[in-house]
Structure formats: structure tokens, C-alpha cells
Image: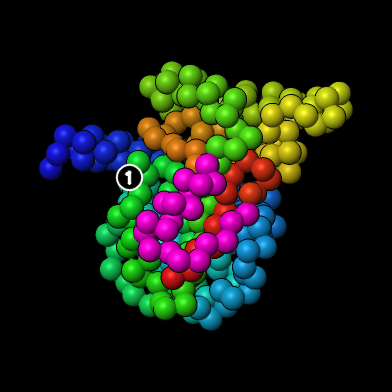
Amino acid sequence: MTKEKIKIQKVQNMTIRDFGNQWLLHGKLREDYWTSDEMFKDYLCNLIDPKIITGSTVLEVGSGSGRILRMIDRYAPNRLIGVEPSKGFNHLHSNTVNVRNLELLNIKGSDYNIKNIDIVFSLGVIHHIKSPQNTLRNIHSSLSSDGIFICWVYGMENNRIYVVVRKIISNITRILPDESLDKICNVLQFFIVRYGKFSVRYMWSRLPITKYIQEVFAPCGELERKYILFDQLNPAYAKYYTKRKFIKTLKKAGFTRIELAHRHGYSWTAAAYK
């Protein structure tokens, strides 16, 4: 293994570790906007009708706390598979005990071996994998001939100032104990909501990420807003994709038809077809 591959593997292992710790700390799921069908449809950006899930074989790469699995379950898939490599797996299991037809695998997205899947979801995961091609190729290979991959990632467009600020701050927050970062995020979420209100009231919604704050962040509960911030400031690796880079990455994995939506102007949702 080359030095570069060893470095990539190290970062990936650190990121998996960070998320495992995160799910142990923030794995509680409540019935609110954060776990709602409205939020699920917001991720999809009208690229697909979620009703196609009904009766299908569906797999999720990076199931985390089980939030998305529970959203998918509302549409009654015939078979549902969750793939999660972290040590938060037991917490994932306890959060999904009532999900029907579910199989959970404590394995990386690059390593599962299942074929003829109708729909693969990976929402908020690929941007945390430093070298995602093995995972994306495995997803492509696992789909049926007319299968669909639904992927959501952070976007670079309209986020450049935020990305710079986040990078500076995260150099500190990544080395903080999780409990300390948790308290910081609890304070930050309070001020971010008020920043959004200030932008709407006094700046005609022109300040950065106002739309995201008003339409996604603020409707979540205080606990969930804290989770969102922790998710931004804790992981060892996060990439913000430009539209061009996102398309190129999916095509490199073998996807031939790609439909994109610029979700709230700050991130990208793709429906990629085999």
C-alpha cells in the first residue's frame, strides 16, 4: 500500500471513529421536522417520487442513527438494508427495532456484496469519504439494470465564505472533547437562528446561508440543531462539491444519466441512473 493510500485510509478510519462517537452522543431520534417525511422529501428535491420505494429493494449507505431508514420505512419497501461501519451500530439497531423488513450490516459502503437493488440512498455521507470511488463503484455494481442512486452532498456554490470559516474553526473543534463541543454547539445554534431572523428582517435575506437557516435549520428542534452543528464541526473529513466535480465523480463510478438539484442553493442532490 502506498503512502498516499495509507494516508487516505487513516483519514477514513478517523472519520468513521468520529461518527461512531457522535451517534453514541447524539443518537436519540425524536418525532419532529428532523425526522419527518417533509424533511425526506426536501432531500429528494422532486427528483423522484418517494412512492417508488413501495415494494422495492432499498439500501442505505451510511445509516448512522437510523434517521433516514425510518423515513424510508414510511413508504413500505419490500426489503430494506442499512449499511453502517461505525461503533454506533448497536445504537442504530435500537433506533430501528420497529422498522419493517430491515437488515443491518456493520460494514463499509465499499464492502457490502448485494445485487439487484432498486434504490440506493446515501444522504450526507459521500462528502465525508476522502476517496469515495470504491464506495460509489460498489453502489453502481449493486444496482439493478434500471436502479437509481439518490445522493446528497455539501455544495461549494454559495458556500465559499462559510467553507473558509468552517475550516478555520474546525481545526480547533475537531480536537476538543465531544462533550465540550456539544456544549459549544448548543450555544451556537441559538445565535445562528437569530442570525437568520436578523438577515430576513434587516438585510432582505441577503446574508450567507439565510435560506438554509430559515427553511431547514430553524424548523428543527434545539436538540437537532445542535446535532447539525456538531456534524459540521466534528468529523475528520468533509468535502464541499462543486456541481462539475460532483457530476464528474458520479460519472467516474459508472453512472451514465445524472439529474441534479441545487438544494436550497447550498448543497446538491443527485438522482444517478445505471
Q: Is residue 6 above or below residue 198?
A: below
- Which type of secondary structure does the marked residue at label 1 adopt? loop
| Quarter of the figure that contains the N terminus | top left
- Residue 131, position as x, y percentages in the image: 33, 45
Is 82 positioned to the left or the right of 221 in the image?
left
What is the count of numbered marks? 1
Quick check: 169 above or below 102? above
Is residue 268 located in the magenta-colored stretch of the structure?
no
Residue 119 rendering spot, x and y as whole percentages:
48, 70
Residue drawn at 37 percent across, 59 percent down:
253
Q: As drawn, which residue projects farthest toward the left?
A: 1
Q: Residue at x 37, y 32 (%)?
A: 236
Can residue 36 be seen? no
Residue hosting label 1: 131
Q: Is residue 23 left or right of residue 51?
A: left
x, y percentage for residue 133?
A: 33, 52
* Residue 258 drawn at (x, y percent): 52, 62
Q: At label 1, which amino acid type do we have?
A: Ser
Q: Residues within 10 Å of mark 1 (few under 14, many from 20)?
A: some
In this picture, which residue range is highlighted in magenta? Answer: 242-261
Q: Would you say residue 258 sits in the magenta stretch?
A: yes
* Foreground of the two, 52 or 38: 52
Way the structure is coloured: rainbow
The residue at 21%/40% (across/down) is 5
* Residue at x 59%, y 44% (from the top left corner): 267
Q: Is residue 19 left or right of residue 269?
A: left
Let me know if residue 251 appears in the view: yes
Quadrant of the frame with the C terminus: bottom left
